[in-house]
Amino acid sequence: MKFAYLSSVVLFATLSAGAQQTTQPEMKVDSSNRTLTVSASETVSVEPDLAVLHIGFDTQLEDAKSAYADGARTSNAIIAAIKQAGIPENAIRSQSQYLERDWKQQHKFKLTQQWTVKVPPERAAEILDIAVTAGATSSGQIDWTVKDEKALEAEALEHAAARARQNAEVLAKGMEVRLGTLIYVSNQVSAPQFPRPMAGFAMRTAEAAPPLAIEPHQVSREAMVYAVFAIE
């Protein structure tokens, strides 16, 4: 896996009487509290090894019985096509299914159903195309991720912790003090959010264009570490 790292650091220090306040890094005079505080963040990005497709459909408005019957046929056709393409049953999960009434028209209903389908990233466009061809008219959202999210988060946290320690040592050296023991540490790991609109598609015909050109984006995790060290 190729990793990309981004980092940002905020540094603070508190020294005994006689220290002068500066702007970068910021320092405070406090004779009762000889500590140095650092806050660092690191972002780790990798290529995804898993794509989660959001696939679904809506039937046309009709009476409840007809909408349910048409929905059942479409539902089974979509899942059969996905399985025939080699996607195992345990990679397909139902999200929602319901018969919805249209209150603007008397006795008119539509059946809506949604699934998530886990596939290798390189097959995302192919499986999406297969589903749409089989009748998935409300599909297109893709969540790019990795199978081992904990490992990615740990990688980001490890780099943030190392960055915090490194900058604490540099700051202590620059202020001519010795870095002491770690007094307090906290951390936070987050994932950047990307807009994922649900796309609607009309059913494809035999003369339709080939599958969409879909390129996955990298999966990222950002870790932040806040640490307080004693200084001597």
Image (cartoon, rainbow, N blue to C red):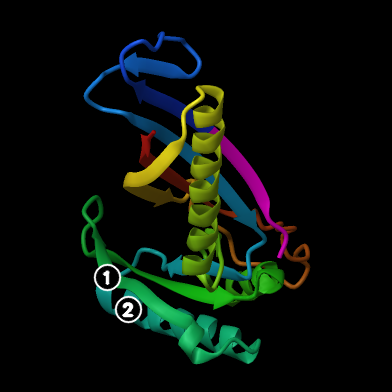
**What x and y, as percent, mark residue 208?**
75, 65
Question: Label 1: which residue?
Answer: 99
Q: Looking at the picture, does residue 147 appear above or below residue 202? A: below
Query: Which element type, helix, strand or loop, lies under badge 2?
Result: helix
Circle 1 packing at 10 Å, graded few (<14), some (14-19), many (20+), is some
Circle 2 packing at 10 Å, graded few (<14), some (14-19), many (20+), is some
Amino acid type, residue under disc 2 in the picture? Tyr
> The C terminus lies in which quarter of the figure?
top left
Which SS does the magenta portion mostly show? strand
Say which residue appears at 57% left-offset and 59% top-offset.
201
**What x and y, as percent, mark residue 86?**
64, 89
Q: What's the CA distance linking mark 2 and mark 1?
A: 7 Å
Tell me which label, 2 or 1, sits earlier in the chain: 2
Judge whether residue 7 is colored magenta.
yes
Say which residue appears at 47% left-offset and 82% top-offset.
92
Say which residue appears at 38% left-offset and 77% top-offset.
94
Res 88 → quadrant: bottom right
> The N terminus lies in which quarter of the figure?
bottom right
The residues colored magenta run 1-8
Residue 196 in sight here:
no
Q: Looking at the picture, does residue 24 appear above or below residue 209? A: above
Q: Are marks 2 and 1 in contact (CB under 8 Å)?
A: yes
Question: Label 2: which residue?
Answer: 68
